[in-house]
Image (cartoon, rainbow, N blue to C red):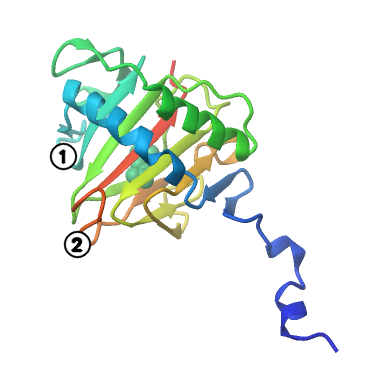
Amino acid sequence: MPGPTADLFADDALQQPAGRERIGDQSCVLRGYALPWIDRLLPELRRVLAQSPFRQMVTPGGFTMSAALSSCGDLGWTTDATGYRYSPVDPRSQQPWPSMPEAMRQLAVKAAADAGFTQYSPDACLINRYIPGAKMSLHQDKNERRYSEPVVSVSLGLPAIFLFGGHERSDKPQKVSLFHGDVVVWGGVDRLRFHGVMPIKDGMHPIMGPQRINLTFRTAG
Ligand code: SIN
Ligand code: FE2
């Protein structure tokens, strides 16, 4: 007679390799993937933010985004009254964005490969800072020139509930809890799925303090 363990594992398709949770045909969460990189990432992140500090941007519709943004890499994502776009310069300083630090780039490339995307050369990393209460409305990442390469998203600090929707804004999103060090990869048939972040709950992260920082890598140019 099969015991409870046999029942639990009856459906092989439900089992995920250790640390990897599938959230779509070509998308997954790599749990804790960035943790071994944190000591290299944080000093790099600090240097980037000293050069291009967080700022709150305004959408073309006139709303101030609750998340504060910065970028590094050849291109940075910006928004203002005239629209969303990638720009080679930080509009605040009119200087090029800080270059993408090596550990950040390597982490993104390795995570993409482990998620099945062996061709990945991100040239843009958007950095979002959420203080408690800040959120990101459902949207598609579609200002990039090519969709053949995935989006890689690294979560740091306070936990978040990530909304992973479908191809229509009205598709009911999955709710995926993301914690410090988790990495999400979505590409291929999932590349243009709607996604967002629910308002961040109050809290204090032992390393990052009272905030969540998210890095999203894309191939934009
Ligand atoms: C984004 O879609 O730009 C950010 C996603 C996140 O903060 O997890
Ligand atoms: Fe996005």
Spot occupied by residue 44 in the image (x, y as percentages of width and height): 30, 28
Cβ(mark 2) to ligand 1 < 8 Å?
A: no
- Label drawn at residue 63: 1
Residue 41, numbered circle: none
Question: Percent x, y for residue 2?
Answer: 82, 85
Q: Residue furthest bottom?
A: 1
**Which label was assigned to residue 202?**
2
Front position in the image: 32 or 176: 32
**Amino acid carrying mark 1 in the image:** Phe
Q: Quadrant of the N terminus?
A: bottom right
Q: Is residue 145 visible?
A: yes
Q: Would you say 174 lies left or right of 14 here? A: left
Residue 95 left/right relative to 23: left
Say left or right for 144 vs 3: left
Q: Tell me where residue 37 sits by quadrant.
A: top left
Seen at 18% across and 50% down, the residue is 131
Residue drawn at point x = 50 percent, y = 37 percent: 192
Decide: few, some or many residues near mark 2? Use Cα within 10 Å; few <14, some 14-19, many ≥20: few
Q: Secondary structure at mark 2?
A: loop
Instruction: Give ligand 2's quarter of the image.
Output: top left
Return the residue nearer the eye: 62 or 189.
Answer: 189
N-term mark: 2 or 1: 1
Viewer-nearest of discs 2 and 1: 2
Q: Is residue 82 above or below residue 56?
A: above
- The span from disc 2 to disc 1 (Cα, nearest Å) is 23 Å
Q: How many marks?
A: 2
Q: Is residue 138 visible?
A: no
The amino acid at mark 2 is: Asp
Q: Quadrant of residue 129?
A: top left
Q: What is the secondary structure assignment of the residue under circle 1? A: loop
User: Which residue is found at the position 29% from the left and 47% from the top?
Assistant: 136
